[in-house]
Image (cartoon, rainbow, N blue to C red):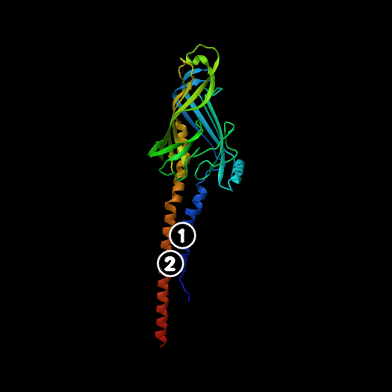
Amino acid sequence: MRKFSRGAVAFLTLGAFLLTLGVAMKVYAYDRLAVVPKDQNTQQILGDDNANFFDADNVAPGSGPISTVATVIGDPDLAKEAADENDGADIAVFTKGQSTDNNDQAPPIDFLEQTFAIDRYTGAAVPWSGASQNGEPIEYEGQIIKFPFNTQKKSYDYWDATVKAPMKMEYEGTEKVEGTDGSIDTYRFSGSIPETEFGVREVPRAIFGLADTGPVEATRTYANERTVWVEPETGVMVKIEEAQKQWLKHDERGAKDVVAMDTVSSSSPETIQANIDEYGSKSASLKAVRTWLPLALGGLGVLSLLAGVALALRFRSRRNADVDDDAYANA
């Protein structure tokens, strides 16, 4: 006679499978889904229709629309080099090119090129000998192109390329970002950089309101009020806004400060919608694997095990009853 019913065995097997699957979802699947692709290739566009700037084409102050295009491209081969330097850590390496201009003609108003290594889960900079900014070696700190997966409601260090140092981005609250077709829930972070000297530039002396006797070196200063809207499950910056000011200053008596940049640049509607389209579904999947899916599978597993145990006990009781009946009949 069988020791267990087929139903009990089926429920016990299913329960064990569901419990194992739930644990695997939590500790195995999530860690492999919540990582930055090493070959990621993305582009973000910010714009301002009413900016004031120093027109590099005419070497004079200008105004009007400007756009900033930032392209980020992953390099799996360099990622392997960076990982070897960091004891095999899970690292991605990216090159970011960023150009700000008013007419898409050389030279641009501003240009930036960065190569950096980041942790594939936290998004934070990782030390690497190949890191550079505009061709110069540099040591990055903090977040650069994204926030961590499962972003928390706290402050984060965020790299500012102009001052070449991290700034503090403070959590301000939750906010729904609207696209042209849909919306997405985000955490809003903001931070500020007070006016800071960051370099020198050779410009005509005349732009300072002085007699034109040739070029002079001007001190460049910069201030920024930066706000980012982060989708918390993926850590992606869905929207960016920068209220940025730059000045050219010359210490000669009578020289007037020149505005090199005065803009409130925001992510374009197309960029925002593209981020919503791409990361909205990824956010839902990651959240499911991180939270309710393991719990649901675990709960179903426990119920199946209990059902299996109940069937086994019931089957055992029936078997014992049958044995007693047989013994009575043979007495």
Using the image, determine if residue 201 lies above or below residue 38: above
Q: Secondary structure at mark 2?
A: helix
State the SS at label 1: helix
- In this rendering, would 173 be left or right of 34? left
Locate the C terminus by quadrant. bottom left
Visible residue check, residue 22: yes
In which quarter of the view is residue 15 placed?
A: bottom left
35 or 300: nearer the viewer: 35
State the count of labels. Answer: 2
- From what the image shows, is residue 109 above or below residue 82? above
Quickly name the residue at label 1: 19
Nearer mark to the viewer, of 2 and 1: 1
Which kind of residue does numbered mark 2 sit on?
Gly
28 or 109: nearer the eye? 109
Q: Residue furthest bottom?
A: 331
Q: Which mark is residue 288?
A: none
Point out residue 82 in the picture as x, y percentages from the top left corner. Answer: 59, 43
Q: Is residue 191 above or below residue 210?
A: below
State the residue at coordinates (45%, 65%). Answer: 11
Please provide percent x and percent y for residue 41: 55, 37
In x, y percent, where is residue 252?
49, 17
| Residue occupied by mark 2 | 308
Please, what is the three-letter code of the amino acid marked with disc 1?
Answer: Leu
Q: How far separated are the C-alphas under marks 2 and 1?
A: 14 Å
Counting other residues with Cα less than 10 Å from the Cα at mark 1, is it few (<14), some (14-19), or many (20 or more)?
many
Task: Point out residue 306 in the picture as x, y percentages from the top left corner.
Answer: 41, 65
Determine whether 288 is above or below 67 in the image: below
Between 47 and 202, the one nearer to me in the picture: 202
Residue 57 visible, this angle: no
Characterize the local packing of mark 2: few (<14), some (14-19) or many (20 or more) Cα atoms within 10 angstroms.
many
